[in-house]
Image (cartoon, rainbow, N blue to C red):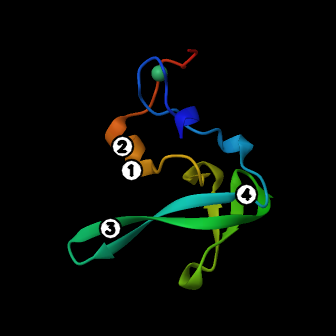
């Protein structure tokens, strides 16, 4: 996890969407409306195909099935979730320890 933490500002470094390839385990954050609130949930999926145009085909467990998602909407399985980015903040200093 430390590779995603900036040594300088202590915020989280975004993974490079271009580094995601077929066969990789990634996580997708899905939202589900439950009455008045919206629940965010990270689902572990696998990249099945690179469709191009910034989109990839992923396969998740059970009802998730196959889904086409934006490349920049997923993150490597070992990266912090988008919720973490929302709470801790995104590094904008460019890192460089
Ligand atoms: Zn930083």
SS at badge 3: strand
Ligand 1 neighbours mark 1 (CB distance < 8 Å): no
| Picture coordinates of residue 71, whole percent (x, y) | 65, 52
**Total numbered circles:** 4
Dot 1, crowdedness within 10 Å: few (<14), some or many (≥20)? few
SS at badge 2: helix
| Picture coordinates of residue 24, whole percent (x, y) | 73, 57
Mark nearest the camera among 3 and 4 is: 4
Give the Cα distance between marks 3 and 1.
11 Å
Q: Are marks 3 and 4 in contact (CB under 8 Å)?
A: no
SS at badge 4: loop
- Provide the residue designation for mark 4: 24
* Above-or-below relation of 18 to 13: below
The quarter of the image holding the C terminus is: top right
* Above-or-below relation of 66 to 47: below
- Provide the residue designation for mark 1: 83
Q: Nearer the viewer, residue 45 or 66?
A: 45
| Picture coordinates of residue 25, whole percent (x, y) | 67, 60
The earlier-in-sequence mark between 4 and 2 is 4
The earlier-in-sequence mark between 1 and 4 is 4
Q: At x 46% / y 34%, what residue is drawn?
A: 12
Give the Cα distance between marks 2 and 3.
15 Å
- Provide the residue designation for mark 2: 86
């Amino acid at each position: 996890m430390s590779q995603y933490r900036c040594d300088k500002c202590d915020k989280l470094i975004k993974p490079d969407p271009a580094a995601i390839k077929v066969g990789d385990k990634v996580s997708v954050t899905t939202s589900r409306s439950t009455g008045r609130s919206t629940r965010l949930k990270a689902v572990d999926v696998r990249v099945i195909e690179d469709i191009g145009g910034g989109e990839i085909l992923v396969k998740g467990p059970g009802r998730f099935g196959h889904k086409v998602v934006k490349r920049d909407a997923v993150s490597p399985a070992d990266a912090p979730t988008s919720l973490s980015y929302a709470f801790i903040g995104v590094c904008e200093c460019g890192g460089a320890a």
